[in-house]
Amino acid sequence: MTNIFTNLRGNLFGGITAGIVALPLALAFGVQSGLGPDAGLYGAIFIGFFASLFGGTNTQISGPTAPMTAVSMVVIAGIIASHNGSVEQALPYILLVFLLAGLMQILLGVTGVGKYIKYIPYPVVSGFMTAIGVIILITQLLPVLGYYTEDDTAFIETFKPQAEEAIMTNILHDEAGEGILVLEDFKETINRSEQISQEEILQEAKVLAKAENSGVAGAIKALPRAIANINWLEFILASLTILIIYGFKRITTVVPSTLVALLVVSVGAYVLKLNYQPIDQIPGGFPIPNLNIFTEFEFGQISPYIFTALTLAFLGAIDSLLTSVVADNMTKTKHNPNKELMGQGIGNSVAAIFGGIPGAGATIRTVVNIKSGGTTRLSGMIAAVLLLVILLALGPVASQIPAAVLAGILITVGIGVMDYKGLKAIPKMQKAEVTIMIVVLLLSVFWNLVYAVGIGLVLASIIFMKKIGDLTADQSKVVPLKNADELTLAWSDEVNFPERLKEEVFIKRLEGPLFFGYTSDFQQLANQIPDTATHVIIRMGKTPYIDQSGLYAMEEVLMNITKKGVTPIFEDLQAQPRVMMEKIDIIPDLVPKELIFNDFKEAVKYARSNIKDVV
């Protein structure tokens, strides 16, 4: 906090510019999430302010981002569907998941996990980011064409039978909870069903119709209907927005083209009194905390989303720390990853309490801040305060923005977020890495973003372990000393030994960690040693690490070769493997301390002195 107020002028300009850039994106991400534009603004305000105040990257601007919004959209849709389509009933549970994600991020920072985020494989990140872009593009095609499910009465009518079934199921569920025996007395059920109005049936049908059209699969199914019933006004407004965003960049980048498109198209549509579809109403006044998230929920309903909250936490961490690296490169500074995670977690937690969608460090906004003069955390806090002022002063005005404009903005976001570098590199990448990327991409788009990342990480880990295991197996050999003279096999100190010694002493060279990916090959050691052998020297100088699987494999091998009358000798045993072997008494029970030597010559000298008639 010491130097936060230095460079006031630069931070003021940086913060104002970043806030202006954030405005249209915050509104668009709020609409895409399903909670409305106000949720996007609240997220940008509270995450932006508190992540800057408590974070570990001085110039970072935080708020809703495309990846975080895409995952949030899945969470929101799922919880709303489980609450009969009622946003009001589902909201406490939705915000609680977001709060849990924020608290988990704080925990990640406190426990020092931040420094490990960088080890997530690039194919997983690449496939995920490209999937986010594809998801945004496909799901925004419907609003670009001016198609909104709630306006398609003919389509909604087809869901009335399912709506009545869902309502009847709820009635039966309620009666069971009240102890009413339906089959013995059906009159109560009939009485309750007669009280259901046509409006309630229609509302339930709308919920089911919207669920049918949600997500990528739903948007693809609805596309033919959207094209057949295209609203040309909405399509023109969205297309103009896209053209201005890309066209204005060619003129100048000083003024954000997204903001220019938002203002020009929105003001033009309003002044001309066009009959367009506006965004949802943005409530005026200061955001009110949703304290009912602490009182009106049951843990059983939230437990299925614990893993989703953890995914949001990790995704936000990756998103933020990648942006922190960009900021470091531009400012020649060094961010504090764990402090950054704590700041992001605090920001997401506060945003959830006030009804905001989760977010992370935003690369474009951060770059704009730095280029406009921002150097300290004050710039991020100014950007957030500017958005709050806009909310308080211009909330009703912002409510007149055409929904098609935000759809156009999101189309450009979807195009921009895809990892073209990774896509272009596909012909040059290894097949395994291409497979991981494509699997994550397809599963994210057509199944589940959360599970796709998990499966991608598992696949990447398995492939990595196999590669390391294969590499270790290729380089680690069992050879008699008589073959060690060959240059293709010998280590520099394995030459010029007596012939008899070469017949009875075998060498096991280990190169690389002894871990679960290599244990099955290592366990073949006992079978590779002939009956003529009396000693085996296990060379451990290039094995810095042994895991539990490797430890027990080592124990099994030593027991087997000891039973065959072969004496095992360790040479150049590293610190970590030695500690592990001492813990389970491999040392001294199977290999006494006197049979552990620092160099190969000492080990051979011992073997030579214990073999009779060596010439």
Image: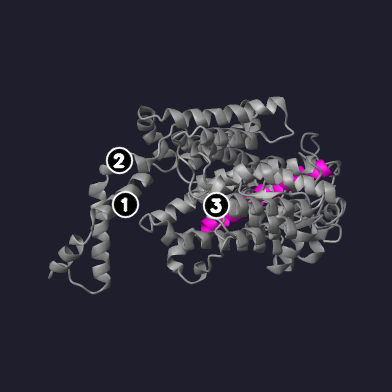
SS assignment at label 3: helix
Quarter in which the N terminus is drawn? bottom right
SS assignment at label 2: helix
Q: Nearer the viewer, residue 49 or 272?
A: 272
The quarter of the displayed image where residue 182 is located: bottom left
Report the magenta residues as a range: 307-331
Residue 435 shows in the view = no
Which label number is shown at residue 203?
1
Q: Pointers 2 and 3 in contact (CB under 8 A)?
A: no
Tell which residue pokes out farthest to the bottom in this image.
Answer: 179
- Amino acid residing under circle 1: Gln
Q: Residue 368's x, y, as percent?
A: 74, 40
Which label number is shown at residue 609?
none
Q: Nearer the viewer, residue 469 or 111?
A: 111
Residue 299 shows in the view = yes
SS assignment at label 1: helix
- Amino acid residing under circle 3: Asp
Per the image, the residue denoted by label 3 is 38
Mark toward the start of the polypeptide (2 vs 1): 2
Which label number is shown at residue 153?
2
Residue at 82% over, 43% down:
373
Q: Residue 260's x, y, as percent?
A: 64, 34
Q: Residue 588's x, y, as percent?
A: 74, 68
Instruction: Report the Cα–Cα distance between label 1 and label 3.
Output: 24 Å
> Would you call the spot at circle 2 few (<14 residues within 10 Å), some (14-19), or many (20 or more)?
few
> Would you call the spot at circle 1 few (<14 residues within 10 Å), some (14-19), or many (20 or more)?
some
Q: Nearer the viewer, residue 549 or 358?
A: 358
Q: Confirm whether the magenta stretch covers residue 323.
A: yes
Is most of the magenta stretch helix, strand or loop? helix
> Would you call the spot at circle 3 few (<14 residues within 10 Å), some (14-19), or many (20 or more)?
many
Q: Is residue 24 left or right of residue 534?
A: left
